[in-house]
Image: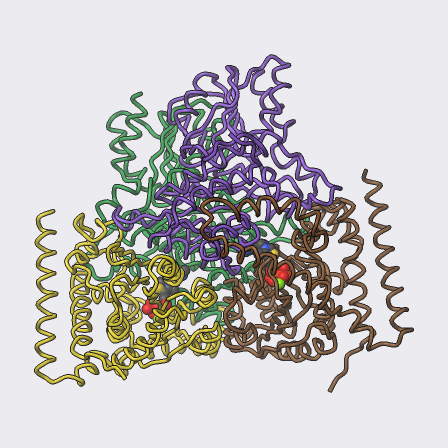
Chain colours: A purple, B green, C yellow, D brown
Amino acid sequence: MTRMTFASAIDHALETAMERDNRVVVLGEDVTMLRRNLYVRFGPKRVRQTPISEAAFLGAGVGAAMAGLRPVVEIMLVDFIAVAYDALLNEATKVRAFSGGKWSVPLVVRAACGGGYGDGGQHEQCLWGMLAGMPGLSVVVPSNPADAAGLMLSALACDDPVVFLEHKLLSDYWLDYLGGASRGTVSFDVPAEGTEGEVEKPPRPVPIGEGRVVAQGSDLSIFSLGVSLHRCLEALPSLADKGIRAEVIDLRSVAPLDRDLIVDSARKTGRVLVVDEDFIGFGLSGEIAAVMAEAGLKVDFARVCTEGVIPFARRLEDEALPNVRRIAEAALAMASR
Amino acid sequence: MTRMTFASAIDHALETAMERDNRVVVLGEDVTMLRRNLYVRFGPKRVRQTPISEAAFLGAGVGAAMAGLRPVVEIMLVDFIAVAYDALLNEATKVRAFSGGKWSVPLVVRAACGGGYGDGGQHEQCLWGMLAGMPGLSVVVPSNPADAAGLMLSALACDDPVVFLEHKLLSDYWLDYLGGASRGTVSFDVPAEGTEGEVEKPPRPVPIGEGRVVAQGSDLSIFSLGVSLHRCLEALPSLADKGIRAEVIDLRSVAPLDRDLIVDSARKTGRVLVVDEDFIGFGLSGEIAAVMAEAGLKVDFARVCTEGVIPFARRLEDEALPNVRRIAEAALAMASR
Amino acid sequence: MMKPDIERLYRQMARMRFFEEAQADLWDRGLIPGEMHLGIGEEAVVAGVLDHLEEGDALALDHRSTPPLVARGVDLASMLLEVMGEEEGLCRGMGGHMHLFSREHLAGSSGIVGSSAPLGAGFALAAQCLSPGAVAFSFFGDGAANQGLVLESLNLASAWKLPQVFVCKDNRWAITTRTRSVTGGCLARRAASFGMPAYRVDGTQVEKVWVAAGKAVRRARAGRGPSFILASCPRMEGHFLGDPLLRVYREPLKQTVEIGPPLARAMLSKPLAALIQRCGYLGNIGRTIATLGGERYLLAIDPLRRGAKLLSEEARARIESEAKSEVAEAVSRAMERRGRND
Amino acid sequence: MMKPDIERLYRQMARMRFFEEAQADLWDRGLIPGEMHLGIGEEAVVAGVLDHLEEGDALALDHRSTPPLVARGVDLASMLLEVMGEEEGLCRGMGGHMHLFSREHLAGSSGIVGSSAPLGAGFALAAQCLSPGAVAFSFFGDGAANQGLVLESLNLASAWKLPQVFVCKDNRWAITTRTRSVTGGCLARRAASFGMPAYRVDGTQVEKVWVAAGKAVRRARAGRGPSFILASCPRMEGHFLGDPLLRVYREPLKQTVEIGPPLARAMLSKPLAALIQRCGYLGNIGRTIATLGGERYLLAIDPLRRGAKLLSEEARARIESEAKSEVAEAVSRAMERRGRND
Ligand SMILES: Cc1ncc(C[n+]2csc(CCOP(=O)(O)OP(=O)(O)O)c2C)c(N)n1
Ligand SMILES: Cc1ncc(C[n+]2csc(CCOP(=O)(O)OP(=O)(O)O)c2C)c(N)n1
Ligand SMILES: [Mg+2]
Ligand SMILES: [Mg+2]
């Protein structure tokens, strides 16, 4: 076990995988600099700079994966996936079915996501719900270094496409680049538990589709992921003060969802709060409601999500993204019903 | 009132609007032929052929709408929106917020959707759930000529972007073009009620966000739209035989959802079946579950949707898309619980 | 200079043609659902290019994917079973004619216009990393050349010196749109501007295609990067089977009864102010149909007829009869299997 | 031939420069959150082009949108308030510096690289329909010229003869990537291949930009279609404020302490086989940083200095002092408003 930052845990997982398997390559804009440690070690053939042509190079990632490579294609910020959407929606996730199960696309799409540092509505989205809506696509969102490394290893081992999302508040270098953290005159509400932690060497794979109970409780289940998970944990003491013992679950994977874990916890507590930094409608929080309803569970339900375009102004942004106050209020309202 | 086909009702609405307001223009691939009646009447400046460059011309539609036109941009089949996704996700739906509410994008995106004629997994998707996941976007899916004309008029009158989806099984010319209906040796399960009907002249606008009760019932609520709605109606007699009186609601708009109508009906019947031709996960059916759960309703819930990549083979396709048998079985299972 | 083996090329062309005709027949009989885009008219382009293909090379195809797969040697009956939606089909009935995949042949296709370009770039990237000397071919149409997927891929391939050959089958149409009317500049010059050799060839002359493709393939195998081939060819069967435009041209009376009245209503709707202009617009539609039909029937140069002239009559007849029976055998094999399923 | 009004051009350049410096200062003080991309170095391009702008023309901008908006006459304080996230800002604090919109000026922007091209095409389409003679300007960078959005738009504008002027600000970099290393061919020839005039100009010489832009704008106003201007310019402040690459160049020691150890670990990790190659890769990184820093500090030609040479010392000083006080006044107005909100 070694202490690592969130970013270096991912680097470490990639390094481990690239060392073991020379079919693993990394493509993306500026990867020579962003992944300079990998570049220095593995060179320009395996860590390859792209033009700003996401549609072409993500599409090429699909072809390369079909033809034997295990590409990690970086889309810088997940917001930019919009210009390359076809490669996921109509190509990567369709090949297994179209080929009658004979061909698959072992592709990892890596992108940074999430807000909280004042970059505005085109750079701070999560979009994991929308992505999870494509049948055949796995979507993972780690909340700490060990999960980040473990999920990256599992993504690399998966024979089907996986989107790996890295929250910018957890990755120091993104905050430095995009938030201008180096100037020292700004500060961000960075969850310490998420940004640094113990990681095994080599990392232990975390299975895709498995959530984790982070805090046990019996009054209420809170399902969350990414940075929001830490906001939930921060809200626990104030809930405990009011005698409410909440169970907090880190979903870790959006697709596939850990249905059993969700249903078990919801059945136990009878109250479900989804805290999701992604947009509120037609996404993860809705799917969780459906999973429970399909399981025949009749529980109280509420959600704290992002409701519209993410505002640029820090004050507005803080209110728009799930924050501790909104979480605590929603949990309280629910528990006292 | 005049009898019209689904397709000519839309044409008629467009013609009415283009006559009233010369800012309304139609852009898209092959529109000179596809909309030849409009072309002959309004000419090439207002019915304008595009290159196969959806990203550019949908993006241009956004700019044109901002600068005073009321463009109807055609994306042929909604599946192809994937190559132009950015124009919706990061541009059209963001401008109102980004401009502090001072600027809006009165854009109509028109596309054909849906399956049932053997065109395979890249040409038969619905995708309305995914689209509805973008805050600020309205998505409408008419199931009959009067609604088609009325929703098109409302879309054209809306100051914000609206996606108008036209199911191919309801539009004769699409079935002719894509299904090869003219050869006479194939047949499709076309819902007669949807393809032809009475339309007012000029059409009466149908408000976006308003569903409609199509059949009254008290045992079970079925929420559906598009072609699936007709499949639900076809399933009613067999349910009635078993003494089950289902209420069938045509949602008509996916976004915004008619929450009141959904909640009222669900409260009344206590059982909800969502029949949705779109993919099952992270979309419309999930959102409906959440809407009810948020309203504090504890109802039985089931869904009949499309579960994965739509198969090409007609037999497999028939099973993959919601069909009468699956609907009846699900309703029966639920009602006898 | 090397010379093409005309017999071999002609055999491929004949195989593709007869296969497409068999598909057309099945489609007419309602055994193939949905759209069916044939590659009739493109045979010389496909044969001339793929004659250079070697084991290990990859194919990225568009919505007219059957001819290249026939040339590539994919089992014919399995393709027929696939487009009829049978379990024994190449893709177990899940793909259909726009989504044919054959892993063993490293061949994939897509119905999204332009997406064969990035797919081919990916195949080429894998070749560059894993099997230097192998080449990826991307086939697409003139209309696709305005799609960002293609344009970005031209740059990507050039920047990465990918072993990729872009083959643009220029039939001058994208469904009902004359490509010229929505395209700025010349496509060959456009491709060249991304930094790669671009060849314009008459795609009805298989031997000319063969020569250009040979240069492109040698360059790719040598690791010197991509090339672009712009090959003009006729569109003999319309955009897809049952193409409504061709129908109007073929059965003008019958179709006018259907299409005419709404058009007349549109012409004469109030206010009538712009009647003369409207006549002009109607004329445009008529002209488009006439051009399209005319190209189909009057001007189209059949690449097979051209190819046949390069052969002795005896050779032509022998090759055709062999190809015909190969296809016939595949059809009966497929129909038999299909029958067993019913 | 017409001559530019150098004083007017220089005034605009000075206004932009001082405004950007003011933004840099606010950013350093932590008053502007997130990224901040300045247009320092691009002033001559923007001034030379927008001098031809008339009322009713439209602007489609990228992530370096403040200089064109300054030149366009948008209220400076309202922009500062916006980038500080205040309710009184141009966009009520909802947009921020990458998403500045001014409806009255028909000006929009986007942080998605390349999307100013279709946005401008849409503005131009509306102009063509509703106000012939009006022109739309699209600004973007050399990196964006590889984005499908831009490439498709070049074709669209050409095919539709849109009154659009594409302005590519070629600073040779896209974040840390040398554009040349991921770009095939020459960008001007690329644009020309879509069927439009393409001008290459030295974008540090405002008068040259002015001449080329004049031709492009006259062509657009006359309804003869789009043009492309490729204007080279320096990137004086790195990609964004706090650019880590520039930091390494500026404070090599401090940064090496941070970045060095992981790099050394990567160099020396087992197996050590490829050590010499790894040295080479490390060298590449060093070279990139050195090139970038060198361009910034040694080779950069400041367009303002160049512009100043065309003026008398008196005029320069007067213009600068006016511009400076205009910006200073805007800053204090903005800070005062902001103070009231706290
Ligand atoms: C992205 C996308 N847009 C539109 C279509 C609909 N479409 C199918 S084929 C076609 C025309 C293609 O023209 P071209 O590339 O010249 O090929 P051709 O059919 O002439 O062989 C179009 C527009 C599609 N399949 N994908
Ligand atoms: C579609 C998309 N991909 C990537 C990015 C991230 N990004 C922001 S600016 C930039 C570089 C742009 O380079 P260039 O167009 O040359 O403009 P410059 O910054 O040099 O002015 C990149 C890659 C983005 N914003 N949008
Ligand atoms: Mg064509
Ligand atoms: Mg640049």
Residue at x 55% of width, y 67% of height: D180
Q: Position of residue A13 (x, y in %)?
A: 47, 40
- Quadrant containing the N terminus of chain C in the rendered view: bottom left
Residue B91 shows in the view:
no
Q: Find residue D169 and report its image quarter.
A: bottom right
Image height check: is D137 above or below B86?
below
User: Looking at the image, which is closer to me, C200 or A327?
Assistant: C200
Most extreme residue toward the bottom is D1
Q: Position of residue D259 (x, y in %)?
A: 62, 46
Q: Position of residue C120 (x, y in %)?
A: 36, 62
Image height check: is C10 above or below A246?
below
Q: Find residue B246 and report its image quarter.
A: top left
- Whether residue D322 sits left or right of residue C156 in the image: it is right
Image height check: is B67 above or below A157?
below
Residue at x 64% of width, y 47% of height: A178
Residue at x 48% of width, y 64% of height: B27
Q: Position of residue D69 (x, y in %)?
A: 73, 61
Query: In what quadrant does ligand 4 lie?
Result: bottom right
User: Looking at the image, which is closer to me, D153 or B21?
Assistant: D153
Image height check: is C16 above or below B280?
below
- Whether residue A214 sits left or right of residue D132 in the image: it is left
User: Looking at the image, which is closer to me, D127 or B156?
Assistant: D127
Most extreme residue toward the top is A243
Residue A151 shows in the view:
yes
Count of numbered labels shown in the rendering? 0
User: Looking at the image, which is closer to me, C263 or A65?
Assistant: A65
